[in-house]
Image (tube, rainbow, N blue to C red):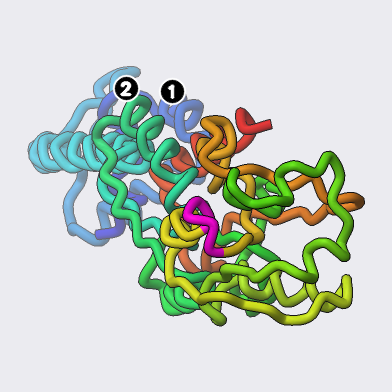
Amino acid sequence: MELHYLEIFNTVAKYSSYKRASEVLNISQPALSIQIKKLEQQINAKLFYKVGNKMLLSDCGVSLYAYTTKIFAIVEEMEQNILKLSEYVGGTITLGGSNTPGTYILPNVLGQMKRDYPSVTVNLHIANTSEITTLIENGTLDIAVNGGNCIYHNSISVEKLYDDRLVVVASSMNHLCNKAVIDIEDLAKESFIVHEKTSQLYSCYKLFIEQNNIPKNISMYLGSIEAIKYAVQANLGISIMPFCAVKLEIETGLIKELAIQAFEHPYPYNLIYNKDKNNSITIQKFIEVLKKVFAQMD
């Protein structure tokens, strides 16, 4: 028996009227009558009979109506539960972040998400941009925020969230902190503390020295931003870093931002996710919170 025929029978039986059933189902009375007859032929039994102007159920019709009432009650319950599930904000999100946004921005996003949607758990994986990109490509991560100007495969959706700025920082003990304006030539005499060679920050350092004809002078490579900041504080060299990573240290005077003439270098943070991976309502809500937090950084 086709569910469509059962739905027509159930509606006719419910209202005891072909006319009312045709209005509810938006089917003409002749078409409705034909389909009831097809159902009767399938089960080889009469379902309705008329007494005067009234339509009454046969014994077989009464039995079938009891079953169809149960069937469509279950169908309605199923539809309601599926709707609730499709609108439910909960479960687990696997989030990725490259070193700078993962350490200095995304924890604030996680805090806001927990306040807005306490049923959601977010697992944050922090790594360099290339590893995060690979994990998005193979579907391990649901979404991620990467820093820097990366080139992505066309299977990845990329949306800019915010433009941070790169700053050159030094220890307050560094002699350059005494200068009101620093020329590029002044930096040529300084040694740099840089991130590992696979990082976007190292790429920024390389681009900077190439554009300004500064000789390569690296005092050390360090694997984390925190390590770089401590090395700068100890006056072991200067470094180029995103402002959000050193904002607190600059505000508290632990390190100084050098006022370099005509130094403007944006450092973007991008939302990325695999185009082939369906974003659930929970992930969509997380993206809303993510954008809200980034918007408040202006």
Q: Residue at x 68, y 44 (%)?
A: 257
Q: Marks 2/1: CA distance?
A: 7 Å
Q: Nearer the viewer, residue 245 or 27?
A: 245
Specify whether residue 235 is painted magenta.
Answer: yes
Looking at the figure, which quarter contains the N terminus? bottom left
Q: Is residue 245 left or right of residue 131?
A: right
Q: Is residue 103 left or right of residue 252?
A: left
The amino acid at mark 1 is Arg
Q: Are marks 2 and 1 in contact (CB under 8 Å)?
A: yes
- Where does the magenta region start and end? 232-236
Give the residue pinned by disc 1: 20
Q: Is residue 228 left or right of residue 262?
A: left
Mark before the other along the chain sequence, 2 or 1: 2
Q: Nearer the viewer, residue 94 or 39?
A: 94
Give the residue pinned by disc 2: 15
Image coordinates of residue 88 in percent, x first then y, are 32, 37
Q: Is residue 34 visible?
A: no
Q: Which mark is residue 80?
A: none
Image coordinates of residue 26 in percent, x first then y, are 53, 34
Q: Quadrant of residue 62?
A: top left
SS at circle 1 = helix
